């Protein structure tokens, strides 16, 4: 595979994004020798499973790992020295400006160029990017990781490239699946409502209830996957804790598991007005309440409550049974459940939504004397989320 690496250019060459100037070849070679001389550096760098490169302050390769050389189909690291990432992977845009990679108008929206710029600016960065290549060659769908560091007073960035094509295809299939299956469930709910009106009996009520549960379970899984993929939108608005608790209690009293369990709102609960995404908060409290109901015995009550904190609010769910120590140690793990295989998303989802999207904290206490209480603490004012804190831009 031939490399298209422009020759040394002058600093005054025009650029639409990042500086065009390059480090002279002899200086690039000196920087390469600097890394080459570090004890065990090559062995450690080669142990990284994804293609990775060390870039200098002018975004030129001064060291590369074995995986990158294999990807570029070059036999020696010297063949990659001095090249910029887009030039090494043969980005179709690099020839559109004499300054090469990072200087074209397309580079302004390139996730790789922005991640590298972040790294050289002293900030760790992860961005998604699609790199178009020559006709007939598939584009590269990548997650680009950039980490800044200094060595002997010189600024560098470590940049790794993770293939994101399979993950992107999976996400697209997930979106299509959820869209289609939710449309089918909406149709089922419509027919169930019509059946209840035509034949008002217990069987029709059960069909409506089950259709509603199917819809809720699918929406819960859709929310969880979006949260784990850093794609979940957050829409905060003013709400009151009493309203959230009463709505969730009403919804979950209808569960089959709750027919012998009392679901009550604490009479001493403080009604606190605050700002948060009500849909996500109801999902969090609902997951905790569902777990508490399933953990309770007949005639045992599950209690919902809230109290004011300094600068915040705490909502809690309490049931009278204690969790064994082994369960407590694993309670927030994604795959752990006391209810069998293929379960265990309730507390994991609650923690993920609370800490990443609601900007709060979740905790629990559990012992034989007090039972089990899960508590969610949130600020009174939901802080504005930096898009980069839970979402990564994707280039088109």
Image: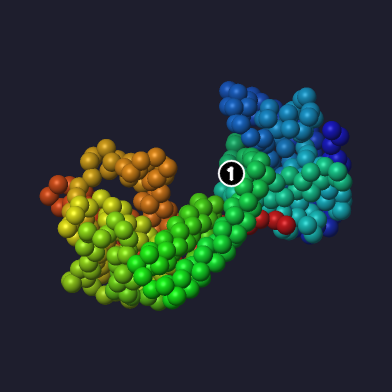
- Among the 4 quarters of the image, the one containing residue 66: top right
Which type of secondary structure does the marked residue at label 1 adopt?
strand
**Image position of 25 (left or right of 148):** right
Q: Residue at x 25, y 67 (%)?
A: 306
Q: Give coordinates of residue 134: x percent, y percent.
A: 85, 45
Q: Residue at x 67, y 35 (%)?
A: 51
Q: Give coordinates of residue 244: x percent, y percent.
A: 34, 71
**Residue hosting label 1:** 147
Residue 142 in view (yes/no): no
**Image position of 169 (left or right of 248):** right
Above or below, 138 relative to 291 = above
Q: Residue at x 39, y 40 (%)?
A: 341
Q: Residue at x 64, y 53 (%)?
A: 172
Which of the two residues, 302 or 152, is positioned nearer the viewer here? 302
Image quadrant holding the C terminus, namely bottom right
Residue 79 in view (yes/no): yes
């Amino acid at each position: 595979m031939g490399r298209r690496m422009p020759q040394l250019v002058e600093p005054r060459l025009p650029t639409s994004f990042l500086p065009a100037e390059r480090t002279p070849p002899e200086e690039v070679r000196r920087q390469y020798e600097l890394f080459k001389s570090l004890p065990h550096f090559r062995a450690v760098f080669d142990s990284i499973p994804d293609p990775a490169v060390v870039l200098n302050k002018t975004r030129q390769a001064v060291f590369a790992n074995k995986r990158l050389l294999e990807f570029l189909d070059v036999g020696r690291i010297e063949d990659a020295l001095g090249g910029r990432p887009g030039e090494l992977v043969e980005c179709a845009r690099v020839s559109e400006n004499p300054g090469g990679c990072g200087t074209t108008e397309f580079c302004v929206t390139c996730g790789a160029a922005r991640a590298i710029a972040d790294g050289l600016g002293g900030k760790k960065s992860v961005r998604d990017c699609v790199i178009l290549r020559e006709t007939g060659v598939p584009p590269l769908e990548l997650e680009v990781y950039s980490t800044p560091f200094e060595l002997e007073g010189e600024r560098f960035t470590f940049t790794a490239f993770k293939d994101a094509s399979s993950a992107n295809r999976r996400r697209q299939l997930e979106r299509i699946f959820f869209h289609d299956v939710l449309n089918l469930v909406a149709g089922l709910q419509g027919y169930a409502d019509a059946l209840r009106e035509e034949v008002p009996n217990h069987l029709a009520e059960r069909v409506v209830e089950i259709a509603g549960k199917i819809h809720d379970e699918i929406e819960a899984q859709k929310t969880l996957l979006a949260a784990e993929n850093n794609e979940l939108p957050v829409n905060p608005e003013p709400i009151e804790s009493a309203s959230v608790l009463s709505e969730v209690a009403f919804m979950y009293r209808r569960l089959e598991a709750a027919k012998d369990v009392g679901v009550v709102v604490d009479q001493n609960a403080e009604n606190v007005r605050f700002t948060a995404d009500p849909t996500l908060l109801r999902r969090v409290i609902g997951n905790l309440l569902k777990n508490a109901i399933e953990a309770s015995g007949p005639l045992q009550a599950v209690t919902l409550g809230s109290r004011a904190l300094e600068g915040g609010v705490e909502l809690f769910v309490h049931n009278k049974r204690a969790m064994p120590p082994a369960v407590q140690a694993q309670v927030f793990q994604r795959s752990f459940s006391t209810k069998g295989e293929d379960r265990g998303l309730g507390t994991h989802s609650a923690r993920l939504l609370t800490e990443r999207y609601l900007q709060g904290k979740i905790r629990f206490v559990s012992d034989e004397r007090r039972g089990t209480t899960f508590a969610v603490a949130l600020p009174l004012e939901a802080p504005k989320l930096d898009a980069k804190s839970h979402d990564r831009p994707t280039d088109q």
